[in-house]
Amino acid sequence: MAGPTKGNGGRKPRCFAPLDPSAQHGQDLPKLKGVIFDMDGTLCLPQNYMFQEMRAALGIPRSVDILDHIRSLSNEPDAASSNTEQNGGPHSTINSSEPPSEEILSHSTFIADPTPSSPQARAVAKIQAIERRAMTSQRPQPGLQELMAHLTRRGVRKALCTRNFPAPVHHLLSNHLPGEKFEPIITRETGGVKPKPSPEGLWMIAQAWGLDREIHGGLENLNSTAKSTRLDPLELAKRYLGSGLIMVGDSIDDMAAGHRAGAATVLLANDENEELAKHEYTSLSIRRLDELIDILERGFVENK
């Protein structure tokens, strides 16, 4: 069920050729390069209570981004822990000489260091504990298996880009989508990229799929567009990198990341997020994942 949206930021509405060859009718439309999915609330039913629990555990209001807050905390070991190390005690796995980094979010860090020794590490441990409890009650979204099986049959690449850490992702895939391939999987632990709403995770996926090598064919057009719009050529190139992709998610972070990456966006709408269907970053909206099957078969058209 497509929902109307407003505005497109001066960008042409995104269109992709139908997956069904018989529906193409000689249309010269770009081919879909792949679909990127969020996880929480997209592949599985929403577990929004998690975020309330996380904010309560961290003592932050709803207006503060959870991951931004964690990155703002000190990564310096507590004095007692530091003294223990100097006296030959257990060695912390956290490198205190470095500023807060993606590595602090690593699951392996907390296996090796069961007693987090810095404010940042303790905050991460708190939210991971909440995520681990929640993952045991994950339930798949209606139409999940049908859509994934269809994309596989059509040879459409699939990837994940989530603000979660790997354990809940692998739990969902192994329990509800065994055998389905998602590659790459970008989590908040992935080095070199900022989490959504940054588009960097989507660009990393596009590069992993080799789409950066296809940019060269459009450089002349990019240079012309850069001159006419006065936009940075590198930024335009990155948007071009994502232009063959669809980002499917349920939050403003998902829509923003997709839009900023130059991708089309699909909102999986529910009673709590349906206002995002009208957001300028949303290309179209659906209520069930398997609604996307018919849309892609007939040809994706951004509802702008």
Image (spheres, rainbow, N blue to C red):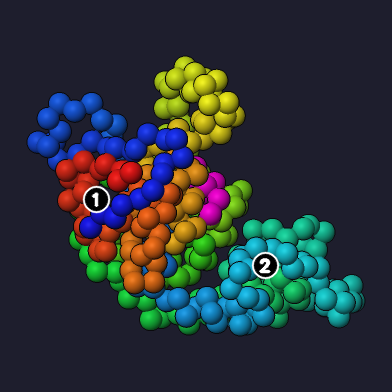
**Nearest-to-viewer mark from 1 and 2:** 2
Query: How many numbered marks, from 0 up?
Result: 2
Q: Quadrant of residue 275?
A: bottom left
Q: Which residues are magenta?
A: 197-203
Residue sitting farthest toward the front:
6
Q: Quadrant of residue 140?
A: bottom left
The residue at the point 78 percent across, 68 percent down is 74
Q: Amino acid at mark 1?
A: Leu
The residue at the point 45 percent across, 76 percent down is 48
Give the labeled residue for mark 1.
151
Give the labeled residue for mark 2.
69
Q: Nearer the viewer, residue 2 or 95?
A: 2
274 w.r.t. 127: above or below: above
The answer to the question of whether label 1 and label 2 lie on touching residues, with beta carbons closer than 8 A, is: no
Any part of residue 200 in sight: yes
Q: Nearer the viewer, residue 142 or 83?
A: 142
59 w.r.t. 196: above or below: below
Of callouts 1 and 2, the N-terminal one? 2
Any part of residue 210 in sight: no
Q: Position of residue 20 (x, y in %)?
A: 14, 40
Q: Reply yes or no: does residue 136 show up in magenta.
A: no
